[in-house]
Each structure stands twice: as C-alpha cells, then as structure tokens.
Amino acid sequence: MKYLISLCLFMLISQSVFADDMRPASLTINSLDNKTFDVVWKLPLKSGKTPPLSVTFDEQTMIVGTTRSRKTTTAVIEKWSIERAQGLTGFTVYVDGLTKTNKNVLLRIIDKKQQTITTVLNADQQSFSVSGKDDLKAENTILTYIVLGTEHILIGFDHLLFVACLVYISGTRKKLLMTITGFTVAHSITLILAATGVLSIPIPPVEAVIALSIVFLAWEIAKNNKDSLSLSYPVLVSSSFGLLHGFGFASVLADIGLPETEKIMALLCFNIGVEIGQLLFVAALFIIFYVISKLYKPLTKDTLRFPVSYLCGSLASIWMLERLAAF
C-alpha cells in the first residue's frame, strides 16, 4: 500500500514538473498626457516561444508610431504608443488568446498623476475597462500582489517540496513552528534585498542550489540520524537554505515587475501571499496525512520515510541536472 501511495504521488508531481511555465505576461499602459499613452507588452519566453497572446483596445483608441521589440533571455518585450481623445475614462483593454493558455496577464494602467490601476487578466476575465477615478486605488495593488504571491508558491514545486521535507524532519510541532518561521524570515530578507536592488546574484546557480537543498534534505530523511545537525536543529537548515529560496522568489517577482509608485507595498503584499500559500500547503499536508492514516492504519511517518526520501531526492536531482545544463 505504501508503495502504491508513493507511486501515485510520483505520478502527480511528475505531471507538475512538466507543466506549463506559469510566469505571467505583463501589460503596462503609462499616461504621457491626457490622451497619449506608452504601452509595454512583456511575454515570457519558454523554449524560445512566447504564449499565443495579443492585445487590442476599444474603437476610440488609435495606435501611433511604430512598434519596437527586443528579446531578452526570459521574455520578448514590445513597446508602442496609443492615443485616445477621451483619455482613460471608458478605456478598455482586451487580451486575446487567454482561453487557449493558462497564462495570467498582470495589467497596470498609470495616469498622469502616477496613480495606478493594478489587476490580473485571465481566461475568466479577458478584458478590463476603466470606469473612473475609483479604479485608481491602492487596494487594487494590495489584492493583486497577495494573489500573485499565493499563486506563485502553490505552483513553485521546488519550494513546496523543500517545505514538505522541512515538515518531515521537524519531528515535533514546536520544532516545526520554529523551522517554518526560520524559513519565512530568511527568504523574506533576501527577497526584499534582491527585489529592491540591494543584493544581486546570478539566478541560474541559485536555482540549481535550491534543487540541491532538496537533495540534501532527502538524504537526511533517508539516514534518519536523530543526532545529526539537520534533525536536531532543523531551523538552522531552513534558515540557511531559506536565504537562497528568497533569491528564487525575487527572480519571479522581477519577471512580474513592481509598480513604480507602490514598490514597497507591492513587495510586502507579494511576500504575504507567499506566506499564505506556504501555510495552506502545510495545512493540506497534515489533512491529507490524517485522512490517509485513518483509512490505512499501518501508514506512519516511519513507513513513509524511504518513499518520501526517494521521491523528493529523485525529482530534485532531475531539476538540479536540468538547471546545471542550462548555465
């Protein structure tokens, strides 16, 4: 039975490993004056291709000038200008192709006073209209970045696997609380420092070491040496590797971008979203284990030790090799 459970978990996570890249596209519309706007359209690159998305506007909006395009290692960025005699009131943005992809589009509309509308477009909401000044509120940014942070941690399978290993090596509830707190504090520090430009390190090596951190924890779970530093003081492990995970979160936030006038608030809200997603995941792990253990009495933490270790270690090893090859 335990091997069947392990196989099901492996199949589930393996599908997740090969899932589509979840980095959002972004569309920024910046007012130059009452009727002229700059548009920046950023599409993430995966295997040299961008998602099949395009932007259109309402009939009162005209494109002026030429479109400039440039390609980075992670995205294609297009820039052009538009004019609208009526200004922002009633201005409508459409993103075509959202029903054919799982992408989100982070939309920012900035008026000439630098007030910002921030929202997310997706398959359920493919357009947005500016109804008036009430749209230009900070609450839009707060909610949007909390949701983005929560979504990111819940689809960040390497981060989730690391957290799952931390739960396993913690042992007691007190140690688990300290371990998760240490991880949270550590990755919050480096996320803030990296996102604000205070610290900057190459992301590919960081991503490879994040995978290596999971391999390390998987090895510790397999050894099950109660006197080892990792099992005796898991908070040291979570805090040390948490610093690296913070740089990983920051790289995703760099792809998303921060609103110029609300950088600190958006950064804090993204971090809050990450913590919410992390707590939801830990709660889900406990609920799943509780339900399965009630259905199958022999299932214990000890019987799951080797399946968990092999599963986490194997997946993380694959990720590490892929990331090393991408240097």
Image: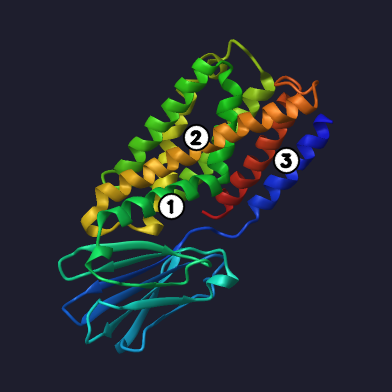
Image position, residue 247 (x, y; %): 40, 43
What amino acid is found at the position of numbered circle 1 in the picture? Leu
For mark 3, does the 10 Å Cα neighbourhood hold few (<14), some (14 to 19), or many (20 or more) residues?
some
Residue identified by numbered label 1: 148
Image position, residue 305 (x, y; %): 71, 24
Most distant residue in the right direction: 1
Residue identified by numbered label 2: 279
Could you tell me which residue is drawn at 56 percent across and 39 percent down?
A: 160
Dot 3 falls on a residue whose secondary structure is helix
Q: Is residue 59 visible?
A: yes
**Where, quadrant-wise, is the N terminus in this rendering?**
top right
For mark 2, does the 10 Å Cα neighbourhood hold few (<14), some (14 to 19), or many (20 or more) residues?
some
Residue identified by numbered label 3: 9
What amino acid is found at the position of numbered circle 3 in the picture? Leu
- Residue 78, compared with residue 304, is above or below; it is below
Image position, residue 312 (x, y; %): 66, 36
In the picture, measured across the screen, residue 15 lies left or right of residue 163, that is right
Image position, residue 128 (x, y; %): 39, 71
Could you tell me which residue is drawn at 67 percent across and 33 percent down?
A: 288
Name the front one of labels 3 and 2: 2
Question: Distance of mark 1 from mark 2, alpha carbons?
Answer: 15 Å
Of the numbered discs 1 and 2, the one sitting upstream in the chain is 1
Question: Distance of mark 1 from mark 3, alpha carbons?
Answer: 26 Å
Most distant residue in the top direction: 227
CB-based contact (under 8 Å), mark 3 and mark 2: no
CB-based contact (under 8 Å), mark 1 and mark 2: no
Could you tell me which residue is drawn at 21 percent across and 70 percent down?
A: 111
For mark 1, does the 10 Å Cα neighbourhood hold few (<14), some (14 to 19), or many (20 or more) residues?
many
